[in-house]
Image (spheres, grey):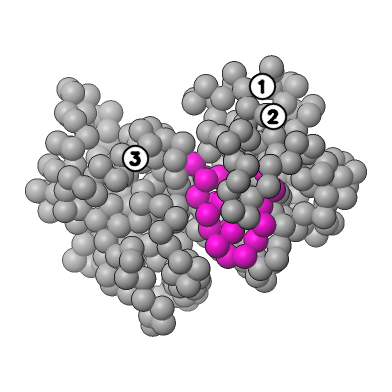
Amino acid sequence: VTATVPIASTRRHLLDVDALSRAEIERLLDLAVEMRAARHRGERRDLLAAETIGLAFYEVSTRTRISFELAARELGATTVDLSVAASSVAKGESLVDTLRTMERTGIGTVVLRHAASGAPYLAARTTRLRVVNAGDGSHAHPTQALTDALTLREALGSLDGRAVAIIGDVVHSRVARSNLHVLTKLGATVRVAGPPAFVAGFDGWPGVTVIRALDQALRDADAVMALRIQLERDAGSGVPSLAEYVARYGLSTERLVAAGTKPEAPILHPGPTNEGVELTAELAEGPRSLIGRQVENGVPLRMAVLAHVAGAV
Ligand code: CP
């Protein structure tokens, strides 16, 4: 792997994408492409053979946890899963105490998911661990946004001048916040649409337009991303009922056609979906869907991030 653009400003941690420049984002995406190609060729690059990576998931996860664990192993690192429910967290151990214990046992990098927005920043401030944010509250999910950007870049060629529509529960979505940063830094404009309670407060983001009418947000869009209604974050109170949400904002091929979305526009969803709510199964599993590709790209993208924060690339 050859480095062409240094990513000095973020070395040691990846807390969010807001501090990354366009060149730094593109360098991480390029690294992920190189990592993926090497993986497909069956080449192992033990860039992190001397590294122990701790997985500290205080919130449930399928995609992010599995892909970080595989990414770490692909790079030759040793992984330690905190298994929060079976740890001394259950006896009242604080987050900082747990992280300091991980540090003292020889863990170099922690991949942290936590329900509290800002938890990774606390980890970075109070320990010498390298910290990778795997999703904090409704604040940020940098590796998901980078995965989505990689997937979109490969589908569209470039994000420059492209219009991406993000539909649904933007307010509670850490993925959406990180995506707004990444997509606009890469030259896209972003339209957000959904029930008023789900899009409040996003007027005024550079490069982002809140559009009240769903059809208007979808018209001529180059790509459409549906977001999960985050029922675990009380998002259910933002809509009268799921049935009403489906009727007004659920995406289907018919709705995209009626709204005039570009026929080739890809459909994304960071997952997991509320099946049949944010989009129909036919759309999620159809030829325009990049949902599977988003998951596949998660491993090489996280390989790039782990190697980057460790200073191995
Ligand atoms: N997109 C995402 O973060 O999925 P998981 O919660 O399954 O990791």
Region rendered in magenta: 174-192
Q: CA distance from mark 3 to mark 2?
A: 26 Å
User: Which circle's residue, 2 or 1, is located before the other in the chain?
Assistant: 2
> Where is residue 130 shown, x and y percent of the image?
24, 56
Task: Establish if 198 lies above or below 309.
Answer: above
Asked if labels 2 and 3 touch by Cβ distance under 8 angstroms, the answer is no
Q: Nearer the viewer, residue 228 or 44?
A: 228
Q: Which residue sits at x=23%, y=67%? A: 49
Q: Which mark is residue 239?
A: 1
> Where is residue 304 shown, x and y percent of the image?
40, 66
Amino acid carrying mark 1 in the image: Val
Amino acid carrying mark 3 in the image: Gly
Q: CA distance from mark 2 to mark 1?
A: 7 Å
Q: Viewed as shown, does residue 219 lie left or right of 132? A: right
Amino acid carrying mark 2 in the image: Pro
| Mark 3 neighbour class, 10 Å CA radius: few under 14, some 14 to 19, many 20 or more | some
Circle 3 is placed at which residue position?
Answer: 118
Q: Nearer the viewer, residue 256 or 174?
A: 174
Mark 3 lies on a secondary structure that is loop
User: Which circle's residue, 3 or 1, is located before the other in the chain?
Assistant: 3
Q: Which mark is residue 195?
A: 2
